[in-house]
Image (tube, rainbow, N blue to C red):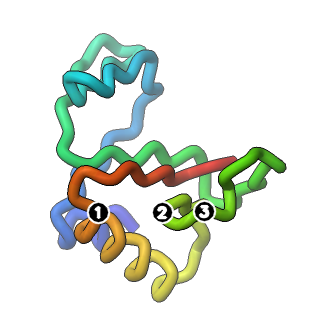
Amino acid sequence: TDTMMASNGVDVVQDEAAKVNREFKLVMTASGEGYTYAKLVLATGSNPIVPPIAGRDLANVFPIVKDAEYLRNMLEACRKAGNEQIAIGLG
């Protein structure tokens, strides 16, 4: 839930990401807002269909599912990631 995310220091923004500038860690939305980030999660829905793309089974690639323990493990991986890239929200 949004409450769970907020209590873990996650800012939840519901908008369409129009452009992501990874060099400057900046997301521009369809509504014209700009957000900088330390860690970025693009959540595309709660029932992911994970397409057959290369790398989907690698470490630090997480489809979002409705499972509290899975989400706790995903958040812990995000905290430990440092400068590693993490892909979240395939589907």
Task: Using the rendered view, name the quadrant where residue 4 is placed.
Answer: bottom left
The x and y percentages for residue 55 are: 66, 52
Task: Using the rendered view, name the quadrant where residue 19 is placed.
Answer: top left
- Where 76 falls versus 22 (above or below)? below
Q: Which residue is mark 2?
A: 60
Q: Is residue 50 left or right of residue 30?
A: right
Q: Which residue is mark 1?
A: 81
**Amino acid type indicated by mark 1:** Ala
- Dot 3 lies on which element? loop
**Amino acid type indicated by mark 3:** Leu
| Residue closer to the observer: 37 or 8 | 37
Asked if marks 2 and 1 touch (Cβ < 8 Å), the reply is yes
Task: Using the rendered view, name the quadrant where residue 82 is placed.
Answer: bottom left
Q: Which residue is mark 3?
A: 58
Q: Count residues near mark 3 (Cα–Cα under 10 Å), then give few for <14, some for 14-19, many for 20+.
A: few
Asked if marks 3 and 2 touch (Cβ < 8 Å), the reply is yes
Whole-angstrom CA distance, mark 1 to mark 3, is 14 Å
Mark found first going from the N terminus, 1 or 3: 3
Q: Count residues near mark 1 (Cα–Cα under 10 Å), then give few for <14, some for 14-19, many for 20+.
A: few
Whole-angstrom CA distance, mark 2 to mark 1, is 8 Å
Whole-angstrom CA distance, mark 3 to mark 2, is 6 Å
